[in-house]
Image: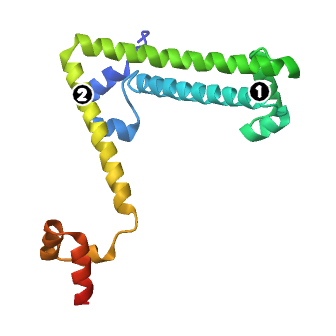
Amino acid sequence: MRKKYRYRNETIIGYLGIDDEEQKALGFYPANVHYYEERQKARERGQKRRKMKEKRDIKIIELFAKGVLQEKIAELVGCAQSTVSKILKAAGITKKKTGIKKAVTILCQKAKKKCKKEVRSEEKLKRLAAEDPEFAKTMERLAELKESRKKYERTKAEFTQEPDQEFLLMGEEEFQYVIQNNCEEYNHSHATKL
């Protein structure tokens, strides 16, 4: 009587024999079922926000390097002028004249880092291709697929141009005749038929 039992959700579900459908109807789940999914979603949202902020910050620094005023930058980027000022201060840009040089060096450093990452990933891919023959086959197949996709896009672009109406209206026999003979002869004979 004096002892108070604190059952976990799993225990109550086990004692009462609640199945998945009833759990959904009641909103009664075992502990930590949704916790990990929610945490993962929150991490993904956080990463997405950070990437968007990084892009915004780079855009602000680029505009400042071009000589645009902070108020105009804020209007173009879609944030407050105080946010622009904070981002510039965080980047170490405090004065207009020296700040433009600093902004240009920051942009160059970011471009170099990006290039280094791309080079590292290329080197990693080459090393994997040399070490793992299955990976090399996969990469070759991927290259073939990319090439076939490019060919497809080129042919699609050619066909989307203004097609010759006569060839659209011809039947199978006429098509074979055109393939076997010269197209000019077909156009001449077709014109005489009409």
**Left or right: 152 as drawn, with respect to 175:** right
Residue name at image x 34 percent, y 35 percent: 23
For residue 95, say whether it is visible. no
Depth order, front residue of 155/47: 155
- Left or right position of 119 against 154: right
Residue 56 at what x, y percent from top left? Answer: 67, 30
Indicate the quadrant containing the C terminus: top left, top right, bottom left or bottom right. Answer: bottom left
Local crowd at mark 1 within 10 Å, few (<14), some, or many (≥20)?
A: many
- Reading the image, the residue beneath label 1 is 65
Q: Which residue is mark 2?
A: 140
Give the quarter of the image for residue 32. top left
As drawn, 63 above or below 117: below
User: How has the structure been colored for display?
Assistant: rainbow
In this view of the protein, which residue sits in the foreground, 31 or 128? 128
Quarter of the rendering occupied by the N terminus: top left
Could you tell me residue 117's position as x and y percent?
Answer: 49, 16
Query: Taking 143 as reference, is 172 above or below it?
Result: below
In this view, 16 is above or below 76: above
Residue type at the position of mark 1: Ala
Dot 1: what SS? Answer: helix
